[in-house]
Amino acid sequence: MPENQNKAEAIAVTAKDLPLHCPMPDAPLWARHPRVFLDVAKTGEAACPYCGAKYVLHGEAPKGH
């Protein structure tokens, strides 16, 4: 994988993608690592501690829990 590939561009997610985890279900096999859940609803963005992928919440965050 090219260095900083995942850090270059944020991945847009919406409320329907929650609960958010990395890697995403459509990630290629070479990009897989242990699944980690990310709280993107609190601040509107989150970064994966394994691969550095940055996720940004687009639209309204879900209400409730």
Image (spheres, rainbow, N blue to C red):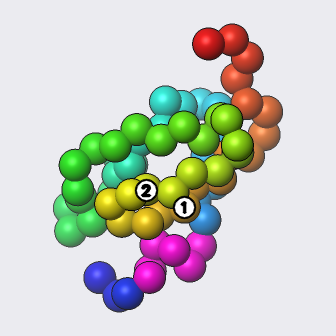
Seen at 73% across and 17% down, the residue is 63
Q: Is residue 36 above or below residue 65?
A: below
Residue 65, quarter of the rendered image? top right
Seen at 39% across and 57% down, the residue is 49
Task: Give x and y (percent) for residue 12.
Answer: 63, 54
Residue behind mark 1: 54
Q: How far apart are labels 1 and 2 at the CA level?
A: 7 Å
Q: Earlier in the sequence, mark 1 or mark 2?
A: 2
Seen at 61% across and 46% down, the residue is 13
Q: Of the residues shown, which amino acid type is indicated by label 1?
A: Lys
Q: Which residues are magenta?
A: 4-9
Q: Would you say the residues marked 1 and 2 are in contact, meaning their CB atoms lie under 8 Å apart? A: yes
Q: Is residue 54 above or below residue 46?
A: below
**Any part of residue 26 in sight:** no
Identify the element where label 2 is drawn. loop
Residue behind mark 2: 48
| Majority secondary structure of magenta residues | helix
Task: Give x and y (percent) for residue 36.
Answer: 34, 43
